Amino acid sequence: MKTIMLVCNAGMSTSMLVTKMKKAAMEKGVDVEIFAIPVSEVAEQVASKAIDVILVGPQVKFMVSQYKKDYEPKIKVDSINMQDYGVMNGEKVLETALKMLAE
């Protein structure tokens, strides 16, 4: 099972996106763990879990370069497309993460 971690300012708005991503994964038969956390918990989660993908919410997009520096190539890092985030398109965000895993 692969693990996808979403990062946002407080971890709340992204929780809605996690729910939609989990639903899309279930419909596609994809076995993934998906969860959301605030920026303040990233280092702790990376140290305690096997994370495969970090997707960063638009409100903290400025953290992407730091996370890439700190965690790639072991963990794939990117930002969530602002439009997909805005409409809470869980299927599209899941597709992004799955493409990252395939690279």
Image (spheres, grey):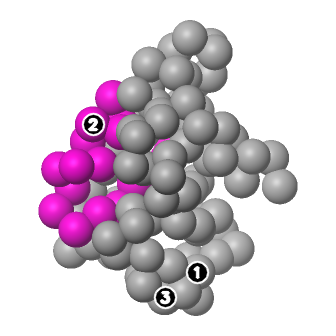
Residue occupied by mark 1: 68
The residue labelled by disc 2 is 16
Residue 56 in sight from this viewpoint: yes
Give the mark, 2 or 1, whose residue is nearer the N terminus. 2
- Which element carries disc 1, helix, strand or loop? helix
Mark 2 crowdedness (10 Å alpha carbons): few <14, some 14-19, many ≥20: some
Range drawn in magenta:
3-19
Q: Are marks 1 and 3 in contact (CB under 8 Å)?
A: yes
The percent position of residue 75, horizontal first and vertical second, equals 60, 65
Q: Quadrant of the N terminus?
A: top right
Q: Are marks 3 and 2 in contact (CB under 8 Å)?
A: no
In this view, 44 is above or below 35: below
As shown in the figure, which amino acid type bears the numbered disc 3? Gln
58 over 90 or under it: above or below? below
For discs 3 and 2, the disc positioned in front in the rendered view: 2
Q: What residue appears at the point 16 percent right and 62 percent down from the top-left corner?
A: 10
Residue 44 in view in this figure: no
Q: Is residue 22 left or right of residue 75?
A: left
